[in-house]
């Protein structure tokens, strides 16, 4: 497929001076219209738009919005105008399931982007799959979502054919972090902590397995309550354990205070986490003592990829109040994957949406392939991203700085 050009969005569009609407008759298969013969296709977005994780969620929403505006500007699909419908899941599985049901009920919705949290995705998958509505997450990293509950035994079974993701998984991210911590940071004695949630516990588990294989020692393990911010008891255990590094499976609202309190307890050792802590908000919460803390995140640094330069410029020009954060590029690419699938379906049906548009878009997604913001975008037989690159970041000078990019060597 052609490499799409990320043409700069004009100031008029960013300011809302240009209204992108389409008109015409409504199709039963999905895709509403507004009177002048064009069809509107809605792409749902589910993410935490309020609450502790809203920084990441708003970056996902804004980047999906930017992709639809770009597609409309370029007239990527003749006769189709794209728009998003963004719903707030507040990082809660029950809210995610309700949002999935709401998106399914809207016949104009032909794809869904999100969610952020793997636990929320678990609650949404069957709802979408029953409706044959494709879902592409820019952020979920839990391996069971695509490879089933027994993936670690080698028995990989894809649970739902409608689920895809543009991020890599914790089956890669945890071990990659372990290799960096043991081989390059030269830390041999780790205290492992997680928040007991799907993402955090899974990530901590894959890190621990690899760290032990490499010869590292586990100084201790602990689970924290993600609803609290008082980690003084855990911090004391870390100090008394003699660990030279902490690995935390979870997200930045807890990781920031945890890092700060561990240092305050006298353990002047780095905290390491996954993509869930890779946010400017972590540094704000952890304070000055976070210098030297580490995080892994999916892909290469977006701001430094040649393929992402126009995305970064366009995002800025569009005037979004919030940063695109860790998953912005992946959200843009996830949204564009839906757009490419819709384009294929329309082209194969004489320039219009077929009666079974949702099923056809889901089917087309399996073969989507293009050069995106984050690199090559395509999916394997499980719906996982074929791009397995990861990056290690270190807090230096009050900001995240990339220190190593590569792929996990299993």
Image: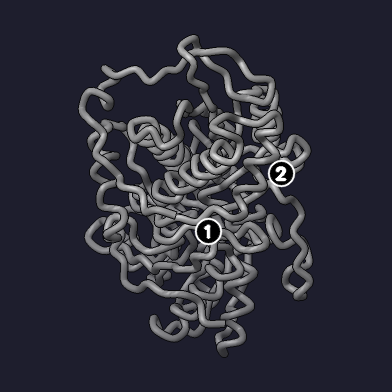
Q: Is residue 369 above or below residue 13?
A: below
Q: Is residue 328 left or right of residue 35?
A: left
Q: Residue at x 58, y 84 (%)?
A: 217
User: Label 2, on which residue?
Assistant: 125
Where 82 falls versus 64 (above or below)? above
- Label 1: element kind: loop
Depth check: give the residue in front, 251 or 124: 124
Q: Nearer the viewer, mark 2 or mark 1?
A: 1
Could you tell me how far apart the alpha carbons at marks 2 and 1 are, in whole angstroms?
A: 20 Å
Q: Nearer the viewer, residue 72 or 146?
A: 72
Q: Residue 175: x and y, percent?
A: 55, 75
Q: Which residue in the protein does label 1 denote?
A: 378
Q: Furthest-top residue in view?
A: 35
- Neighbour class for label 1 at 10 Å: few (<14), some, many (≥20)? many
- Above or below residue 408? Residue 114 is above
Residue 308 vs residue 393, the one in the foreground: 308
What residue is rendered at 46% in x and 75% in y? Answer: 407
Name which quarter of the figure residue 22 lies in. top left
Q: Position of residue 289 (x, y in %)?
A: 32, 60
In this view, which residue lies farthest toward the bottom? 215
Disc nearer the start of the sequence (2/1): 2
198 or 167: which is nearer to us?
167
């Amino acid at each position: 497929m052609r490499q799409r050009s990320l043409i700069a969005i004009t100031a008029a569009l960013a300011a809302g001076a240009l209204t992108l609407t389409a008109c015409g008759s409504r199709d039963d298969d999905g895709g509403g219209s507004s009177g002048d013969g064009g069809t509107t296709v809605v792409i749902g977005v589910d993410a935490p738009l309020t609450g502790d994780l809203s920084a990441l969620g708003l970056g996902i929403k804004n980047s999906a919005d930017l992709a639809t505006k770009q597609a409309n500007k370029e007239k990527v699909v003749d006769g189709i105008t794209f728009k998003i419908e963004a719903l707030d899941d507040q990082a809660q599985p029950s809210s995610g399931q309700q949002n999935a049901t709401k998106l399914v009920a809207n016949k104009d919705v032909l794809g869904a982007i999100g969610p952020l949290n793997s636990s929320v995705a678990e609650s949404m998958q069957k709802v979408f799959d029953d409706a044959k509505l494709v879902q592409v997450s820019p952020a979920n990293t839990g391996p069971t979502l695509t490879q089933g509950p027994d993936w670690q035994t080698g028995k990989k079974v894809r649970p739902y054919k409608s689920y895809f993701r543009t991020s890599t998984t914790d089956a890669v991210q945890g071990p990659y972090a372990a290799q960096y911590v043991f081989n390059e940071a030269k830390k041999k004695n780790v205290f492992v902590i997680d928040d007991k949630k799907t993402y955090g516990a899974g990530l901590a588990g894959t890190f621990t397995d690899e760290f032990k294989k490499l010869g590292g020692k586990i100084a201790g393990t602990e689970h924290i309550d993600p609803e609290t911010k008082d980690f003084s008891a855990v911090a004391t255990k870390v100090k008394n354990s003699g660990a030279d590094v902490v690995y935390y499976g979870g997200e930045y609202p807890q990781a920031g205070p945890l890092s700060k309190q561990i240092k305050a307890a006298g353990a002047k050792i780095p905290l390491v986490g996954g993509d869930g802590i890779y946010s400017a908000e972590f540094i704000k919460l952890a304070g000055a003592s976070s210098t030297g803390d580490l995080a892994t995140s999916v892909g290469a640094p977006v701001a430094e990829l040649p393929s992402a330069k126009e995305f970064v410029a366009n995002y800025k020009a569009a005037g979004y109040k919030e940063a695109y954060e860790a998953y912005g590029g992946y959200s843009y690419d996830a949204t564009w994957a839906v757009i490419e699938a819709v384009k294929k379906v329309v082209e194969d049906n004489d320039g219009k949406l077929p009666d079974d548009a949702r099923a056809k878009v889901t089917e087309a997604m399996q073969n989507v392939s293009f050069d995106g913001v984050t690199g090559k975008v395509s999916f394997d037989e499980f719906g996982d991203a074929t791009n397995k690159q990861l990056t290690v970041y270190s807090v230096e000078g009050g900001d995240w700085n990339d220190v190593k990019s590569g792929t996990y060597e299993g």
